[in-house]
Image (cartoon, rainbow, N blue to C red):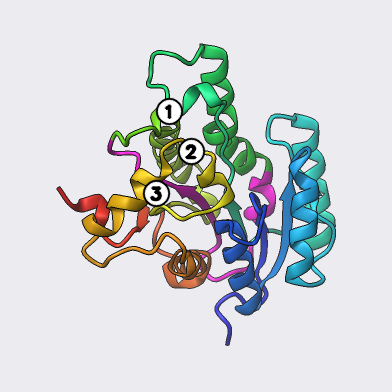
Amino acid sequence: MALLSDHRILITGVLTDDSLAYGIAERALEEGATIALSGAGRAASITRRTAKKLGDIGEVIELDVTNDAEITAAVAEVEARFGRLDGLVHAIGYAPASCLGSGMLVAPFSDVATAMQISTYSLAALVGAFRPLLAKSTATGGASVIALDFDGTRAYPMYDWMGVMKAGLESLGRYLAREVGPDRIRVNMLAAGPIRTMAAKSIPGFSLFEDTWADRAPLGWDVHDSSAVADTAIAMLSPLLRGTSASIIHVDGGAHSMG
């Protein structure tokens, strides 16, 4: 039996077919899941074009995490389609240009607040809104929420305020796991090594990660291959990891633990 047979999963953050979320969506379909994708604002048109490569998966759901009305409408749409939710993939992140590559003393609080709302707080907003549907999961072990992460325990060059947002995301994930665990909802972080995606190209100095990560990782690392990330996400969404919550699962070749 496929790992995600009879699973209903909402996947956010799909842009082009090189995005981590796209790889997860593709593998979820291969493992028998029924999926829905969401998109926001002008980027939703890109998501719609990319979604066609996955086959007939229904209309892309409009979901701007800064818009309460759209969140409410998205919940209603998912309920109408699926009746429940067995998995939710949070692959949402954004920071204004002042928050990346200029150090920590340049960005005004308004820009930092924007990065916080979209990249970190949005996980709480979505888990809270979709909690009733996640609580209805019929999957063995209950529903699974995954938030895509990047190691928040270190200060990386040029990553600046986004690093702070990821550290906050990791902490938030633990608190959410504590709160929704009684509803048989597990919440985990998937901390991926650097992958060359459209989002990564917007990070100033991304080549610094490319140039050094493979040398630091004992297993090596290929910034052009996200398949290990997608495979790990499938395991996290499946009943195989039904006893794991409030955890950060690293898929980075082991680099995060090296000196």
Residue 249, image x, y percentages: 36, 56
Mark 3, Cα crowd under 10 Å, few <14 / some 14-19 / many 20+, is: some
- Determine which residue is flagged by label 1: 101
Question: What count of labels does the image hold?
Answer: 3
Q: Please determine whether, in this image, residue 39 is positioned above or below residue 251.
A: above
Nearest to N terminus: mark 1 or mark 2: 1
Q: Residue at x 49, y 50 (%)?
A: 148
Horizontal arrangement in the rendering, residue 141 relative to residue 82 (left or right): left
- Amino acid type at mark 1: Gly
User: Magenta stretch?
Assistant: 130-154
Picture quarter with the N terminus: bottom right
Nearest to N terminus: mark 3 or mark 1: 1
- Determine which residue is flagged by label 2: 203
Mark 1 near mark 2, Cβ–Cβ under 8 Å? yes
Q: Which residue is drawn at 32% across and 51% down?
A: 211
Mark 3 near mark 2, Cβ–Cβ under 8 Å? no
Mark 3 near mark 1, Cβ–Cβ under 8 Å? no
Depth order, front residue of 158/191? 158
Mark 1, Cα crowd under 10 Å, few <14 / some 14-19 / many 20+, is: some
- Determine which residue is flagged by label 3: 246
